[in-house]
């Protein structure tokens, strides 16, 4: 059984005296259903699971918004009382019956004693459709992404995983297992965090087996396109999907995805990929202060792929190619390291918060500058770069720090932890904190 941090979130949810129905959100095959099943099993709960894609006839009873009638109907299907003590009701593929989403509010208001969990593979499309009443304030969300590097390490090398902590990595005498952590990181970059890929790797140790899983997952996503597109649009979606991997961490320019399609068509398809959570948006912000969203330009953005392993597979990069790169070249590749750090920073605030990320961009005739990521750290703007090289070579970072009068920045690279004061001008300096790449999920 693969260990997920979200299991602890579910444990806190079910123990809360203010518990609401829990709605799991995330891309297909990130492990939403498995998370619920494993949680119920580990806590000895009776799981009453119904797949609404297979039982679309339940639309009628969910439309009544009557929790008692709904439970009786589901109980008749499963052959047991779904309201029995110690039971969890799990509505899987809930997007197939949108009325079930609306009915969640009445479970909270009229049957709060029953723990209810719901999930769906293309849930974002249903949530974007306001033809039904959303249970605003009556449900909780759990945003699930791929397994992170720490979860991967727990599955592959539990002892090394036990050593990985911010305290150990930042120790004055250095992190003793740095080289082993970097080696495992390279493996993660090839395997990625999709649960089935990780499971196959732990069982076989074969990258060939992992590659088959990656191909199957990507093919499943392509097959899904038929659910929200057809004909010519379907062909366009397949074409643009094939271009996603090479456009990761690059400012979106529609011509880079297609020279034949109109910009509006490309935009609409990318919006669909965002809803399916196949990609995430890193939006530009002027970053003059917090909240960062106050100065966000959602039309200027760069994409991150769902998972670094899937991205590398789509780009034809395997473990041999990754092992052939030295540490500096690994970071110098840019998109790979930036994708790795980005997909971890997306979930930095925990699974209850919708994943969101910003970056800073300055465009000009001769002074273009870009800082990979920008976070809000308490009341301060915190720029983050994923770079190899000396502090003095961080031109864009230094430009942003000087312009915004910031005093601290973070860099991720392939080296060990360090902290240094870097002079900007004879009268001003900033603190540069450098973390090894594998510390991203611990930040």
Image (tube, grey):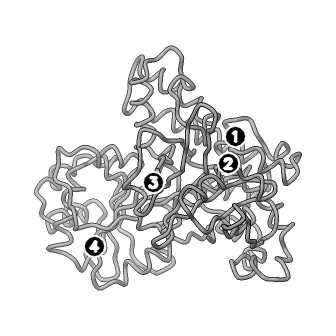
Q: Distance of mark 3 from mark 2, alpha carbons?
A: 17 Å
**x and y percentages locating residue 304 in the rendered image:** 56, 45
The residue under label 3 is 26
Q: Distance of mark 4 from mark 3, alpha carbons?
A: 19 Å
Using the image, tell me which numbered label, if any, was put on residue 313.
1
- Circle 2: is it few (<14), some (14-19), or many (20+) Cα within 10 Å? many
Q: Quadrant of the N terminus?
A: bottom right
- Sequence-wise, the earlier of marks 4 and 2 is 4
The residue under label 4 is 20
Q: Distance of mark 1 from mark 3, alpha carbons?
A: 21 Å
Q: The residue tagged with tag 3: helix, strand or loop? A: loop
Whether residues under marks 1 and 2 lie with C-beta atoms below 8 angstroms apart, the answer is yes
**424 to 222, vertically: above or below:** below
Q: Nearer the viewer, residue 323 or 110?
A: 323
Whether residues under marks 1 and 3 lie with C-beta atoms below 8 angstroms apart, the answer is no
**x and y percentages locating residue 171 in the rendered image:** 78, 82
- Sequence-wise, the earlier of marks 1 and 3 is 3
Whether residues under marks 4 and 2 lie with C-beta atoms below 8 angstroms apart, the answer is no
- Circle 3: is it few (<14), some (14-19), or many (20+) Cα within 10 Å? many
- Circle 4: is it few (<14), some (14-19), or many (20+) Cα within 10 Å? many
Query: In the displayed structure, does residue 123 sit left or right of residue 74?
Result: right
Q: Nearer the viewer, residue 345 or 83?
A: 345
- Sequence-wise, the earlier of marks 3 and 2 is 3
Q: Nearer the viewer, residue 340 or 126?
A: 340
**x and y percentages locating residue 274 in the rendered image:** 44, 42
- Sequence-wise, the earlier of marks 4 and 1 is 4
- At x 74%, y 78%, the residue is 170
The residue under label 2 is 309
Using the image, tell me which numbered label, if any, was put on residue 225.
none
């Amino acid at each position: 059984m693969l260990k997920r941090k979200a299991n602890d979130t579910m444990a806190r949810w079910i123990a809360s005296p203010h518990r609401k129905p829990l709605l799991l959100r995330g891309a297909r095959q990130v492990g939403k259903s498995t998370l619920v099943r494993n949680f119920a099993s580990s806590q000895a709960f009776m799981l009453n699971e119904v797949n609404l894609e297979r039982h679309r006839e339940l639309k009628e009873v969910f439309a009544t918004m009557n929790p008692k009638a709904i439970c009786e109907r589901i109980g008749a299907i499963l052959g047991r009382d779904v309201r029995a003590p110690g039971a969890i009701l799990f509505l899987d593929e809930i997007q197939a019956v949108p009325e079930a989403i609306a009915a969640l509010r009445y479970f909270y208001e009229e049957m709060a004693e029953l723990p209810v969990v719901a999930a769906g593979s293309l849930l974002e499309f249903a949530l974007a459709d306001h033809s039904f009443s959303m249970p605003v304030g009556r449900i909780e969300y759990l945003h699930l992404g791929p397994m992170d590097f720490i979860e991967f390490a727990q599955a592959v090398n539990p002892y090394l995983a036990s050593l990985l902590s911010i305290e150990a990595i930042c120790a004055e005498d250095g992190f003793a297992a740095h080289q082993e952590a970097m080696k495992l990181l390279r493996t993660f970059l090839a395997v990625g965090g999709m649960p089935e890929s990780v499971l196959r790797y732990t069982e076989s140790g074969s990258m060939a087996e992992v590659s088959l899983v990656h191909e199957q997952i990507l093919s499943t996503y392509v097959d899904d396109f038929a659910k929200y597109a057809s004909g010519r649009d379907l062909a366009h979606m397949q074409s643009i999907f094939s271009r996603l991997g090479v456009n990761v961490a690059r400012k979106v320019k529609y011509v880079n995805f297609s020279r034949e399609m109109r910009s509006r068509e490309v935009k609409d398809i990318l919006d669909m990929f965002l809803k399916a959570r196949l990609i995430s948006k890193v939006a530009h912000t002027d970053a003059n202060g917090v909240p960062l969203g106050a100065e966000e330009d959602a039309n200027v953005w760069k994409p991150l792929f769902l998972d670094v392993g899937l991205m590398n597979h789509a780009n034809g990069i395997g473990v041999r190619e990754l092992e052939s790169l030295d540490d500096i070249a690994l970071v110098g590749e840019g998109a790979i390291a930036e994708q790795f750090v980005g997909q971890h920073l997306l979930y930095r605030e925990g699974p209850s918060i919708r994943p969101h990320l910003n970056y800073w961009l300055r465009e000009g005739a001769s002074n273009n500058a870009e800082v990979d990521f920008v976070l809000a750290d308490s009341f301060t703007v915190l720029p983050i770069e994923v770079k190899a090289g000396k502090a003095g070579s961080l031109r864009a970072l230094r430009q942003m720090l000087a312009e915004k009068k910031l005093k601290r920045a973070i860099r991720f690279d392939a080296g060990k932890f360090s902290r240094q004061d870097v002079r900007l001008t004879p009268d001003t300096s900033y603190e540069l904190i450098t973390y090894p790449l594998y510390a991203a999920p611990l930040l």
